[in-house]
């Protein structure tokens, strides 16, 4: 990770009538990092992401994505970002090859199907219909489609919701792999363990404002420095570690 800014958000505000969903927030995302946007439901994180993804209009503020101003260069921004579709957005009766061709056509982009499916460990499933995949496989395919236009930045919204522990960890490996190839990843998640393990830095939002922004380790150290202690002594492993250790980390056909 370096400290070249790839996304700059300044004084972003979004109003719905008299309700202010996002209240003048500012933050930067660095090139090549995994950046987490965390917060309870209704905190404004999805709205913030949708504005950066060019899917929703802002009320006020300035957004620069990879040097392009969202007010002037919206089409240039669309070409360099990948946005994960919810898995309900895919045609269930098409097979994976057909779906990739469909997306490649939308992006007007030649794509090496085998390479793409290999990256997400689904090359064996090229001829399977989308509806035949397990939850974890659907999520991995959904992430694969964000990579078709070879984006600089991808946005993943709650990518591991509803997955079992193995499928979650396999997805974490995939996200790290994508980042290692130079792509910046922005992720929203409800799972704090996921953010702690995956993210280089996180912004915590509540009621439309960013109330903390730092690396997970630094935020934890800052909390401990206030005298905070967990009520129960911290163990060297947790139950999920036991589960994975006993049942194995290998990909399953699920």
Image: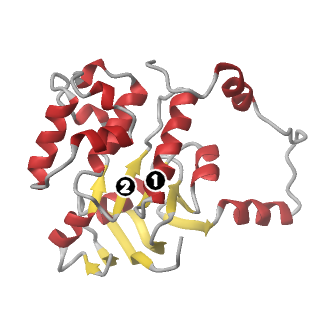
Q: Nearer the viewer, residue 37 or 184?
A: 184
Q: Is residue 146 visible?
A: yes
Observer-nearest of 62 and 115: 115
> Up-down: is 242 above or below 180?
above
Q: Is residue 17 visible?
A: no
Per the rendering, the mark at residue 187 is 1
Q: Viewed as shown, does residue 216 lie left or right of 70?
A: right
Disc 1 is placed on an element classified as: strand
Q: Residue at x 26, y 39 (%)?
A: 114
Q: Secondary structure at mark 2?
A: strand
**Quarter placement of the N terminus:** bottom right
Name the residue beneath numbered marker 2.
Answer: 155
Q: Can you say whether 170 is above or below 26 in the image?
A: above
Residue 83: where, in percent of width, then height? 29, 52
Residue 135 as seen in the image, left or right of residue 203 = left
Front residue of 13 and 95: 95
At x 33% / y 22%, what residue is drawn? 133
* Residue 247 percent location from the top left of the image: 65, 19
Q: Residues within 10 Å of mark 1 (few under 14, many from 20)?
A: many
Quadrant of the drawing holding the C terminus: top left
Q: Position of residue 219 (x, y in %)?
A: 70, 63
Query: What is the number of callouts on the image?
Result: 2
Q: Would you call the spot at circle 2 few (<14 residues within 10 Å), some (14-19), or many (20 or more)?
A: many
Q: Is residue 58 above or below residue 5?
A: above
Q: Are marks 2 and 1 in contact (CB under 8 Å)?
A: yes
Q: Position of residue 232 (x, y in %)?
A: 88, 39
| Label whose residue precedes the other's in the sequence (2 or 1) | 2
Q: Quadrant of residue 81?
A: bottom left
Give the Cα distance between marks 2 and 1: 6 Å
């Amino acid at each position: 990770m370096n400290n070249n800014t790839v996304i700059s958000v300044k004084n972003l505000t979004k109003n719905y009538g008299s309700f202010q969903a996002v209240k003048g927030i500012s933050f930067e995302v660095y090139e090549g990092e995994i950046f987490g946007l965390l917060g309870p439901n209704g905190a404004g994180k999805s709205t913030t992401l949708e504005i950066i993804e060019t899917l929703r209009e802002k009320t006020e503020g300035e957004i620069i994505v990879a040097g392009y101003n969202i007010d002037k260069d919206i089409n240039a921004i669309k070409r360099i970002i990948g946005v994960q579709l919810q898995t309900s957005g895919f045609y269930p009766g098409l097979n994976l090859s057909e779906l990739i061709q469909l997306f490649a056509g939308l992006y007007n982009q030649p794509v090496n199907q085998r390479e793409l499916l290999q990256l997400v460990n689904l090359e064996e499933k090229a001829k399977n219909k989308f509806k035949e995949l397990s939850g974890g496989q659907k999520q991995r395919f959904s992430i694969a489609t964000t990579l078709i236009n070879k984006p600089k930045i991808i946005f993943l919204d709650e990518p591991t919701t509803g997955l079992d522990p193995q499928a979650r960890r396999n997805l974490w490996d995939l996200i790290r792999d994508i980042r290692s190839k130079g792509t910046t990843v922005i992720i929203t998640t409800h799972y704090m363990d996921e953010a702690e393990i995956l993210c280089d830095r996180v912004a915590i939002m509540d009621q439309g404002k960013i109330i903390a922004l730092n690396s997970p380790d630094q935020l934890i150290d800052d909390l401990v420095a206030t005298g905070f202690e967990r009520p129960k002594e911290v163990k060297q492993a947790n139950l999920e570690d036991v589960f994975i250790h006993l049942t194995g980390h290998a990909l399953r056909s699920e």
